Amino acid sequence: MMHKQRGAALMMVLLIVAIMVVLAVGLTDGVRYSSQRLLNQRLMDQGYWYALGGERIAVFGLQDASSEPVTALNQDWARKDIVFPIDGGSIAGLIVDEQACFNLNALYRAEAATGAEEDVTAAELIFTGLLENLEISAQRAEFIIGRTQDWIDSDFSPEGIYGAEDLTYTALDYPYLPPNSLLDSVSEMGLYAEFEEDEQTRIEPYLCALPEVSTTINVNTLAVEQAALLAAAVGNVISMEQAATILESRPDTGWDDVASFVTALELPAEDPLPANILQAIGVKSFYFRGLADVFYEQRQMRLFSRLVVKNGKAIVYAREYGEVF
């Protein structure tokens, strides 16, 4: 009997030891996991503060250029090789002019369109011309314009033959409501434009969504690859090839004013640009997007900052983290 009791006692001891080992391993793993999580959080927080430091550099750069009468690519803010070394990594910076694109919110209409030819706005003409240069039909342009205008207007009634409001979107398999306010991102087009094939990838590089309706396209900061937009911005009175040539021969300091740009177009005197088209182009920008790309201790933090320059001050009005889509 005593021999059997000693065997039972040994089994109990072994069971207790096994339980303690399991608990110890679990506790050790929990401590290791928590320590690594806290380390990652600390390093990402440090990367975030470095990114904010990069943002402040962008603010100072834009404020320095704000006193210039024009916004051009020869200015310091437009440099693409800005890298600052830091302990444990680096900060790479980039600033993009958000007026070197077509502002979708410019399509906003305070009143419904009458359908008359003279009622077509400059923004609608430019957008239609841009899609024409991208080999997208005028009917598709009219469809996207109608959907965009209903998406951002403040009422709840569809306008025009392509208009759509709550009833259209709530009847979908995955229903949602239109915001009835200005677009925050070009990606919102995917919710209402019903893109065909590769339309979205062809159109989006030329578009932006600014928190203002009345903005101009800065001809001083357009890239040569954006010749389709420049041609559309002047009513397609020049070809895309001519637009590319004009951008390639643009002065390093940009055109001094819109009149100098129009002179460079070398249009016939009897066929000047319409006044409403002239109002849609400019040589000064106020909206920008900055990128602070931080590499710190083998970790990456990407901070996109949207900035507006007002009264000589650069103000950050929105931030996005990670990849912008």
Image (cartoon, rainbow, N blue to C red):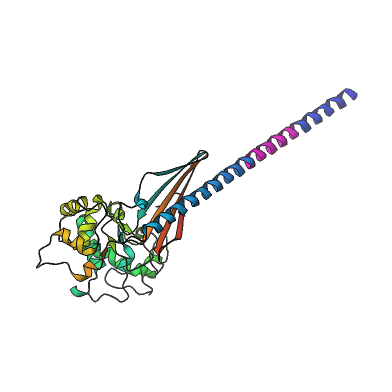
Q: In the picture shown, does residue 312 fall above or below 25? A: below
- Left or right, 314 with respect to 268, comes to right
- Left or right, 145 with respect to 5, comes to left
Would you say residue 247 is visible in this rendering?
yes
Is residue 292 found inside the magenta-colored segment of the image?
no
How many numbered marks are there? 0
Per the rendered image, the range of residues in magenta is 18-34
Rendering quarter of residue 276:
bottom left
Q: Whole-percent x and y of residue 54?
A: 46, 50
Q: Whole-percent x and y of residue 260?
A: 20, 61
Of residues 22 and 186, the one drawn nearer to the viewer in this rendering: 186
Q: In the picture shown, does residue 255 fall above or below 323? A: below
- Left or right, 217 with respect to 300, comes to left
Of residues 246 and 318, the one drawn nearer to the viewer in this rendering: 246
Q: Whole-percent x and y of residue 265?
A: 16, 59
Residue at (20%, 70%) from the top-left corner? 275
Residue at (61%, 40%) from the top-left corner? 36
Q: Whole-percent x and y of residue 272?
A: 14, 67
Of residues 243 and 165, the one drawn nearer to the viewer in this rendering: 243
Would you say residue 173 is visible in this rendering?
no
Of residues 35 and 77, the one drawn nearer to the viewer in this rendering: 77
Is residue 31 found inside the magenta-colored segment of the image?
yes
